[in-house]
Amino acid sequence: MQQHTLKITAKQQPVVMERLLQVIRYRGFNLLSVSMFTTEQTNQLAIVVSVESDKSIKNLKNQLLKIIDIDQIKVEDQALQKITA
């Protein structure tokens, strides 16, 4: 299974995390870790999610971008991080 880290910027809304986690689960990804904090300058959420699956991360990213409160997603491949570390 491949591991991926998603760095997400989203509007600070009460339902953002719930929708995000639902899409991850519905798309068949295992959640490895999640962290979230607010950015004071822009009043947005910075979310870092690590997931694992044999399925396409591109498909997950496209589905997450359909959530209206999500502004940006950056995908990092864990395999590349291990090589550079």
Image: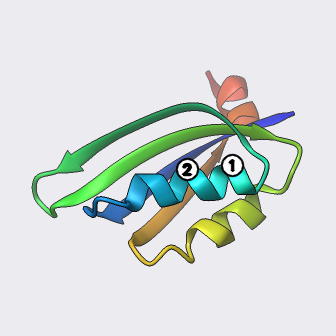
Which amino acid is tagged 1? Arg
Q: Which mark is residue 21?
A: 2
* Residue displayed at 82% across by 37% down: 2
Which image quarter is the N terminus in? top right
Q: Label 1 near label 2: C-beta < 8 Å?
A: yes
CA gap between label 2 and label 1 equals 6 Å
The image shows a total of numbered marks equal to: 2
* Residue displayed at 43% across by 69% down: 70
Q: Residue 13: percent from the left, percent from the top?
A: 27, 64
Secondary element at tag 2: helix
Q: Is residue 18 left or right of residue 57?
A: left
Q: Which mark is residue 75?
A: none
Mark 2 surroundings: few (<14), some (14-19) or many (≥20) residues within 10 A: some
Q: Residue 6: percent from the left, percent from the top?
A: 56, 48
Which residue does the numbered mark 1 point to in the structure image?
A: 25
* Residue displayed at 74% across by 44% down: 29
Which amino acid is tagged 2? Leu
Q: Is residue 12 left or right of residue 26?
A: left
Is residue 25 shown above or below 32? Answer: below
